[in-house]
Amino acid sequence: MKITSHPFSELPFTKLFRDYANNQNDILNFFESSPFDEELLDKRVIQLEFKGNRSRLADQLKAFNSELEAPDETLENIEKFRDDQTLAVVTGQQLTLYGGPLFTIYKVLTTIILANKWEKKYKKKFIPVFWLADEDHDFEEIATVGIPSDEGTNELTLSAEPGDKRVSEIHLDEALNELKDKIKTELGSTDFSDDLWSMLDSCYSADETVRTSFAKLLFSLFGKYGIVLAGSNSDSIKMIVNSTIIKCIDKREEIFQQLTDTSDKLIEAGYHGQVKVQQSNLFWIDDNGKRVKLNYDSGRWIAEGNGNTSWTNEELKSVAKNNPNRLSPNVFLRPLIQDTFLPTFAYVGGPGEIAYYAQMKSLYSIFEKTMPVIMPRFSATIIESGIERILEKLSFSTAEYHNRIEELETKYIQSTDSPDIKSLFAEWKRKVEDITSEMKPMVAEIDPTLENTAGKASATYYTELDKLKGKIYRSLKQQEKTQLNRISKIKNNLFPNGNLQEREVAFIYFMNKYGLTVWDDIFDSFEQEMPNNHKLIYL
């Protein structure tokens, strides 16, 4: 396995993320520290102060993880949180079916590698933690599995009607078997298929919820590294963090203003606001388990479309104090709950998460906290041997395959030994223009009213020339069909659906082809790397 690096600037990442990864001050001003400034990291280790009860934290994590059948390595790491010096390196995401896209793997690998690196450097315990996004209710976002195809990916979706419950609570039921059969067919059978499906079936079944299935998969893959799971869809954990929820109610107006001001400053600095700022950062869980948006209007909190149920500040604070799991955080409040519960040294996020953290710096001060170090996750493209072989036969750089297929084909045709079609037709049109310029005065002498008509005749000729040029390009494309097919194959492999591979392709695709240990091999290769540029992984 070979790893090479590629600059983010040549790939389809936002300006905000590219500048952040490149340590540009314009964006770093929206964070507490640079992720790659060793001196600032050294200070952060010393300054970080966790105000929570560590024994209570360890007890809750033990109960939470034991329920999810955590391995011994995880339970041993949980016990380390009782030590005042232990810190957490956290990542997290939605609870995707069968693990989701490749970036899931890259997030976990980054978190474990950084925890190991900082533990050696600072002689403290750093524990990798995966925060399960068990409060989300957008089922459509987690229910699709992308399997590579000749056109990009085939999107296979679970056919279920979950309503608006928190996704973590949904039972998979028999619809899972239908999805499983489709995935099996798309993946095909290999020497590793039996092992893969034995593992997946032990995690995902009709009896499991989305949360328990996803958790078991993470433990199957990374339990030996001591990964610890956490989440906020828990009565007991919500009781620990309910002070943060209460403050979110008390400080609603200040939170709204600070988020608005910061978002405006981001835009003024040439960046974008990832998340729309709203008056409320809370959801209500109704009696049927439905997660509905809480709006704020005229001094009352109103459950959207829920029978006009509403509360005053004091009434909602009473709920937060006595029954906090009836309240659920949005994307801005979730990190604050997470950092109330855990001694978070760093959060490992993708480009979208880094973008919404850029809106949040002032929010942390309202909650009397300091934003953790926000580390980019590893970003990577896997290049299989078959793709590497045909890559070598073409002159495009890896990044160029993100361009539209039509642009790639035209550029290739123009680079071959075929006639320079563009120049040929440009010369042809120039000669037509010269002749037209010469003949128009003669026409005008005969009949001045026909001079413009003579000009239009040449314009019509230009149109026909353009049509002919298109036909010649198509003819050359047919003659170069083998190479053009290779271009299409490479593009669909590296940038399926025009997007980064890591966001589109289910990671189980590579396990089916290369075995269950493929991520361990990549882990070993990544250990000496840093996530400050895009990686090309040659399998």
Image (cartoon, grey):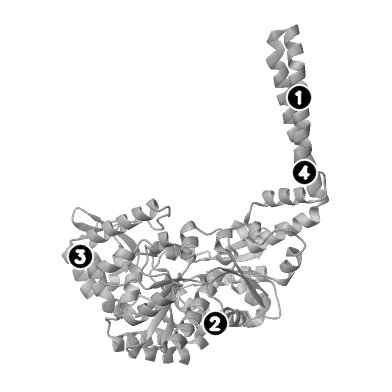
Distance of label 1 from label 3 (alpha carbons): 78 Å
Check disc 4 and report the residue beneath it.
Answer: 473
Is residue 126 placed above or below 36 in the rendered structure? below
In the image, which disc is placed on residue 41? none
Q: Position of residue 17 (x, y in %)?
A: 48, 62
Q: Is residue 305 above or below residue 197?
A: above
Q: Earlier in the sequence, mark 1 or mark 4?
A: 1
Looking at marks 2 and 1 on the same chain, the residue that comes earlier in the sequence is marked by 2
Up-down: is 202 above or below 446? below
Q: Identify the mark nearer the N-term, 1 or 3.
A: 3
Q: Give SS at disc 3.
A: helix
3D distance between C-alphas at marks 3 and 4: 66 Å
Label 4: few (<14), some or many (≥20) within 10 Å? some
- In three-dimensional space, the C-alpha distance between marks 2 and 1, rounded to whole angstroms, equals 71 Å
- Name the kind of residue labelled 2 in the image: Leu
- What residue do we see at 45% from left, 78% from top? 212
**How would you rate the neighbour count of disc 2 (Cα within 10 Å): few for under 14, some for 14-19, many for 20 or more?**
some
Residue underneath mark 1: 434
Q: Give the residue number, with chain letter if any, for mark 3.
A: 250
Residue assigned mark 2: 221
C-alpha distance separating marks 1 and 4? 26 Å
- Mark 3 vs mark 4: which is more N-terminal? 3
